[in-house]
Amino acid sequence: MAISDKKVENIEPDYTRRKVKFEVYGEEMIEKTVNSSGNSGRVYLPPEWIGTKVKVIKC
């Protein structure tokens, strides 16, 4: 029997939500609250940031 024929069960461990530490280097930081926007969320950032690379970390 090929591996693809076998029934694959969820073998991922039961992860609990826990905080992790990130160390990030950058030029500027802004703390914002995500607002509802249709079926998604939205955060407004300064227009000077347009075209730059950003990272979002959920706290």
Image (tube, helix red, strand yellow):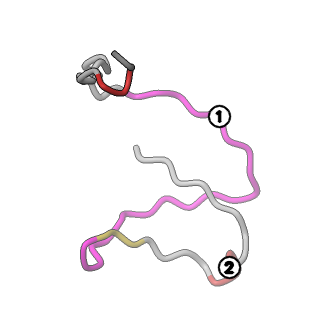
| Residue 4, x across and y down, in percent | 36, 27
Q: Give the quarter of the image for residue 15.
A: top left
Residue underneath mark 1 = 23
The chief SS type of the magenta part is loop
Q: Amino acid at mark 2?
A: Ile
Marker count (numbered):
2
Quick one: which residue is furthest to the front in this view? 1
Magenta segment: 19-39
| Residue 50 located left or right of residue 37 | right
**Residue at (29% x, 29% y) in the render:** 17
Q: Secondary structure at mark 2?
A: loop
Q: Give the quarter of the image for residue 24.
A: top right
Quadrant in the picture for the C terminus = top left
In the rendered view, tell whether residue 27 sits above or below residue 17: below
**Residue at (23% x, 23% y) in the render:** 7
Residue underneath mark 2 = 50
Q: Amino acid at mark 1?
A: Glu
Query: For this rendering, which residue is in front, 10 or 20?
Result: 10
| Residue 36, x across and y down, in percent | 27, 73
Query: For this rendering, which residue is in front, 4 or 24?
Result: 4
Query: For this rendering, which residue is in front, 57 or 13?
Result: 13
| Comes first in the chain, label 2 or label 1 | 1
**Residue at (30% x, 25% y) in the render:** 5
| Residue 34 located left or right of residue 51 | left
**Residue at (64% x, 84% y) in the render:** 47
Q: CA distance from mark 2 to mark 1?
A: 23 Å
In the rendered view, tell whether residue 22 sits above or below residue 16: below
